[in-house]
Image (cartoon, rainbow, N blue to C red):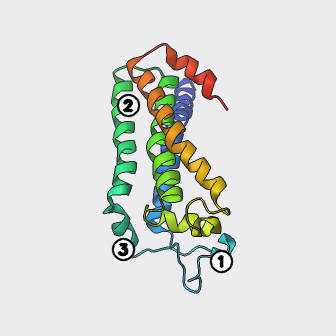
Amino acid sequence: MENAKRRERTAMESLFVYWPFLFTVGTAVIILILDPSPPGLDDPRHPADAMWPPTFDWTGAQAVFVLKNPLFLGTFFPVVLGVFCLRFLLQAELFVTSEHASMNWWLCNLFWFHIGCDVLSGYYQVMPVLTDLYKRMNPAHLEEQWHPLRQHLDAAYLLELLVEAPLAAWVLYLYWVGDPARFISLLLFRR
């Protein structure tokens, strides 16, 4: 019975620590296989619900296209590398579980969600496939930057680029070096 409780605790701790990474991988898989322009929906002004049921590219061509893109590689693989490096540091008992979870959170947010998803896909619109999905989710993305229909989105994307991403890097650094200020950051950024 004690082994079952230990396994359950370990599974729950793993979920607690790695859920940001699982979410990151999930969104990356969507980019690799979800067809952003299904047949019959050539005009991206169609609402997102017109894409139901979703169509997938099972040929691998879209995945190869995305995996060759330096923007995707530059935002996704630092997360993968960072999560695995943190895992080995945790095994060396350099961080407690809650700090490991926080570092994964800040790492995934910094590289993938702030920069890869919102800044590169929403603001600059250069991330492969995800940019097309952003346009499907909100047709305001079809307008030029700072157009009245999308200025609220651009303001949020610039906030992420100029404030949230640098703060995420700072907090990640504070955890990395074990600075006591990392705990104050939890109070400042708690939602």
Q: Which of the marked residues, 3 or 1, is nearer the chain's N terminus? A: 1
- Amino acid type, label 2: Leu
What residue did someone put label 2 on? Answer: 86
- Amino acid type, label 3: Ala
Q: Give how far apart the Cα atoms at labels 2 and 1 are.
A: 42 Å
Q: Quadrant of the N terminus?
A: top right
Q: Toward the viewer: 159 or 32?
A: 159
x and y percent of residue 102 in the render?
51, 29
Whether residue 95 is situated above or below residue 48 in the rendered picture = above
Q: Toward the viewer: 32 or 6?
A: 32
Q: Badge 2: few (under 14), some or many (20 or more) residues near its Cα, within 10 Å? A: some
x and y percent of residue 124 in the render?
47, 58
x and y percent of residue 108 in the render?
47, 41
Marks counted in the figure total 3
Q: Give the image quarter of residue 85.
A: top left
Name the secondary structure under disc 1.
loop
Q: Give how far apart the Cα atoms at labels 3 and 2 are.
A: 32 Å
- The mark closer to the camera, 2 or 1, is 1
Q: Give how far apart the Cα atoms at labels 3 and 1 are.
A: 24 Å
Which residue: 50% across, 32% down?
Answer: 167
What residue did someone put label 1 on? Answer: 46
Q: Quadrant of the C terminus?
A: top right
Whether residue 8 is situated above or below residue 23 in the rendered picture = above
Name the secondary structure under disc 2.
helix
Whether residue 112 is situated above or below residue 127 in the rendered picture = above
Q: Which mark is residue 61?
A: 3
Which residue: 50% across, 44% down?
Answer: 161
- Amino acid type, label 1: His
- The mark closer to the camera, 3 or 1, is 1
Q: Evaluate whether residue 98 shows in this view.
A: yes
Name the secondary structure under disc 3.
helix
